[in-house]
Amino acid sequence: MSGGASQASWNTRAFWGNAALLSLLAVLGFALSALQAGDWWTAAPRNARWAGAAITVLAYALFCGAILWRSRPRRERDETPAGPGACFVLVAYASQTGFARQLAERSAESLRQSGLTVKLRALGQVDGELLATVGRALFVVSTTGEGDPPDPSLGFVRGVMAQPATLGHLRYAVLALGDREYEHFCGFGHLLDDWLRRHGARPLFDLVEVDNADESALRHWQHHLGQIGGVTDLPDWTPPRYEPWILRERHELNPGSVGGGVFRLAIAPPAGTAPAWEAGDIAEIGPRHSAQSVAMLLQTAGLPDDAIVEADDAQESLATLLARSHLPTADEIRSLDAQTIADTLKPLPHREYSISSLPADGTVQILLRRMLRPDGTPGIGSGWLCDHAPIGGEIALRLRSNPNFHVPDPARPMIMVGNGTGIAGLRALLKARIAAGARRNWLLFGERNADRDFFHGDEIRAWQSQGFLQRMDLAFSRDQDRRIYVQHRLQAAGEALREWVGAGAAIYVCGSLAGMAPGVDAALRSTLGDDRVEQMLADGLYRRDVY
């Protein structure tokens, strides 16, 4: 029994024990008073002796009840049943060895740090009634043997998944743990994901596969947790081991755009190295504060700018450490020595960007939009890369494989759909397809204005003229009175869509999770039907990299 449960039990026993004792004393007092010929207390109201005792008992009971209510465990308060669409997030885990439970607990804590209310449950404790009260749910599930669920989750599989369910109100995500040595890698995770989709639940983002506790896949899951909570600065569970890459180029592609500046960056690997990646992979970058903001903080706090400290088993300047950490206020550090400050600093979490280039290009190229805070200042990640990082300076970078978004077989037709900076991932896929000689490619792309926001437009039109793009549909929403988005173009091309899918086409979607991705999904389902879309998901022919 937990300490909180033991305390609650003790409080309950104490309450009823004290109430019973007071009741006994009150009855005894009333009996003794009946033996008196007159008032036994000269100040007693003549007709209120019993009423007074009863009121005293009631008051004490209410008092004890209030204490008991306030002292019950926090988890009990948080888990009061709520109605459909309740404002909490369910985190459920299916664990055989305890690893899935550990990751679920970390996920729950990350969401709580974002200010969300969380219910943590073993999957075997989740029933249809609980699912009916949940607006959002995260499932962290292991697979045992050849695609089997963990033993403690068999009750959910046989009891809940064997029954029909109406889950149209539910938004969900699945973190699937497995081992690629097995034929049915992450089999139970995919089974659960398929069951949720088929009963109307809508994914917050696509299933994340983890092969043998792969740290990069877990950081990708953490990235999505931050998006759910609306917080980009959640700490990494395991800090990535960056390498010092070099910023070679930075160009703003759309000066004056109503959508904000979008920048193309080219980042070269460390000298003497030849890192490999595939189209669809991700660049994880460690952001930094500007040198000016760090210098101003040290000056305001009255601290030297050349102090050397110990951090991560190495020596570096306090200014360098501050640049890659959450910045304290000047008042928080004014009276502290440099090493004490260093010991309290928390690192900035990484940022993820789709890679738009191939190793043959010689650099990792990314597209990103300068994000602005409500006060007009740039965010930490985009501010560092778009404004503060010097050309020729170091960029802390690590490559992450993203096999869920690698190119299909060159013989298979491919439909690519995206908007905004999502063209980055699609550009890499197109470059890989062209290098492999694949010509049956269809691109659908949307942004605001054609004259400013068709990123890599000249290059893409050249590919079209060379026959590497059989079809291209563009949607620039601000170039006409009626807003037209990429999902509208896809809906209008229904006949061609059915023809391409009938020929075995794979559909890849890259770009905005809000608006575009669900709009494209709805257009696919209305044109192809739910069963066809679900089968494409199961076959790996419908893939998404959305954010």
Image (cartoon, rainbow, N blue to C red):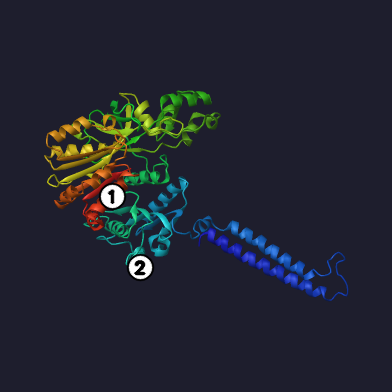
Asked whether residue 181 is in view, the answer is no
- Residue found farthest to the front: 481
- Classify residue 452 by image quadrant: top left
Quadrant in which the C terminus appears = top left
Residue 227 location, x and y as percent?
A: 39, 44
* Label 2 sits on residue: 159
Asked whether residue 338 is in view, the answer is yes
- Classify residue 311 by image quadrant: top left
Q: Which mark is residue 463?
A: none
Between 447 and 48, the residue placed more toward the observer is 447
> Counting other residues with Cα less than 10 Å from the Cα at mark 2, is it few (<14), some (14-19), or many (20 or more)?
some
* Label 1 sits on residue: 521
Between 202 and 231, the residue placed more toward the observer is 202
Residue 98 location, x and y as percent?
A: 37, 57
In primary-sequence order, the first of circles 1 and 2 is 2
Residue at 50% from the left image edge and 62% from the top image edge:
1
Q: Secondary structure at mark 2?
A: helix
Between 169 and 319, the residue placed more toward the observer is 169
Between 506 and 334, the residue placed more toward the observer is 506
> Counting other residues with Cα less than 10 Å from the Cα at mark 1, is it few (<14), some (14-19), or many (20 or more)?
some
**Amino acid type shown at disc 1:** Asp
Residue at 53% from the left image edge and 61% from the top image edge:
5
